[in-house]
Image: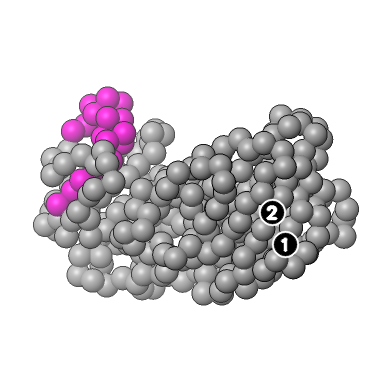
């Protein structure tokens, strides 16, 4: 099996887990490629140069599976690398919460053994596509979590005129508007009180950020809807962020958002479900008073 490893450049205290990952893949007969930036980090920060087949520096890499080593931000960057190739991505969590990177470092050996004997599942996750006359993102105009339209460096709100399938919905006066996939419903959207949507639901959620009117609530729509936005701002420009990758757009810009024509495949252990992750990460069913005292 050909494995590509993508990692964050913040792995303090995770040296043993990283070595365990490389050693176990080799022990199981796998061949390893490493993203160039992460390889430089390992060799420079840890003086660790694992035996690998090659370094990933371009869009051409022959992988059967990609491993994201870090938090959910690292997973999103890995998904951006994979893009349309639909290479399954396994997330190993060396970060904090981790809804996407949900395999703990204490589960590395067991999980890799399952992977190499084919005992795992893959989930197809929807991706959003941004279409704009201003090609700031080039061919990387996709988001697995959310597309965020946000104010920039000012206290003034932005105005977002919103159409669904060319029918006018509303004009949001807010600090921003999030358009999130089910995958992104547990990320930024959840932090602004958007609903949690299970991965199998074919929906998108529009969640305003600090709206001027309190009766403006998040809205769930079918994922095959086309969303047209026109944004106005007193500041002269605003931000569009694709999974944390931001670009500046001028006021009066208009763009379209729709579901992309490909999915991201996420590797899951057969005995782990989305509901398990919710209970574990959000402490559902747990007395928070007991957690606070431990």
Q: Is residue 43 magenta?
A: yes
Q: Residues within 10 Å of mark 1 (few under 14, many from 20)?
A: some
Residue 98 in percent (x, y) is at: 49, 53
Q: Quadrant of residue 233?
A: top right
Q: Residues within 10 Å of mark 2 (few under 14, many from 20)?
A: some
Q: Residue at x 76, y 31 (%)?
A: 235
Q: Is residue 27 magenta?
A: no
Kindly check if marks 1 and 2 are in contact, taking CB atoms under 8 A apart as contact: yes
> What is the CA distance from the residue labelled 1 to the residue labelled 2?
6 Å
Residue 14 in percent (x, y) is at: 35, 39
Label 2: which residue? 229
Q: Which mark is residue 129?
A: none
The one of 292 and 191 positioned closer to us in this rendering = 191
Q: Residue at x 81, y 60 (%)?
A: 170
Residue 29 in percent (x, y) is at: 11, 57
The one of 145 and 195 positioned closer to us in this rendering = 145
Q: Secondary structure at mark 1?
A: strand
First to last magenta residue range: 31-49
Q: Give the left or right position of residue 176, taking residue 275 as reference.
A: right
Q: Which mark is residue 163?
A: 1
Residue furthest front in the image = 133
Q: Is residue 96 above or below residue 170?
A: above
């Amino acid at each position: 099996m050909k494995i590509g490893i993508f990692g964050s450049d913040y792995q303090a205290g995770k040296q043993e887990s990283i070595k365990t990952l490389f050693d176990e893949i080799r022990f199981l007969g796998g061949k390893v490629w490493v993203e160039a930036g992460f390889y430089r980090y390992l060799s420079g920060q840890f003086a660790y140069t694992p035996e690998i087949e090659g370094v990933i520096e371009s869009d051409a890499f022959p992988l059967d599976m990609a491993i994201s080593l870090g938090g959910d931000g690292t997973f999103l960057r890995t998904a951006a690398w994979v893009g349309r190739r639909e290479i399954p991505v396994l997330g190993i969590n060396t970060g904090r919460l981790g809804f996407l990177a949900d395999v703990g470092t204490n589960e590395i050996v067991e999980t890799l053994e399952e992977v190499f004997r084919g005992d795992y599942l893959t989930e197809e996750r929807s991706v959003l596509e941004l279409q704009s006359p201003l090609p700031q993102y080039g061919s990387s105009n996709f988001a697995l979590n959310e597309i965020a339209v946000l104010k920039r460096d000012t206290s003034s709100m932005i105005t977002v005129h919103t159409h669904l399938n060319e029918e006018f919905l509303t004009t949001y006066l807010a600090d921003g508007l999030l358009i999130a996939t089910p995958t992104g419903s547990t990320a930024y959207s959840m932090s602004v009180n958007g609903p949690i949507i299970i991965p199998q639901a074919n929906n998108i959620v529009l969640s305003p950020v600090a709206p001027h009117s309190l009766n403006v609530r998040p809205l769930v729509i079918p994922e095959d809807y086309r969303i047209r936005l026109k944004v106005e701002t007193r500041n002269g420009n605003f931000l569009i962020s694709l999974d944390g990758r931001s670009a500046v757009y001028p006021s009066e810009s208009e763009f379209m958002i729709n579901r992309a024509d490909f999915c991201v495949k996420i590797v899951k252990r057969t005995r782990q479900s989305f509901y398990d992750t919710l209970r574990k990460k959000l402490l559902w069913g747990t007395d928070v008073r007991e957690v606070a005292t431990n």
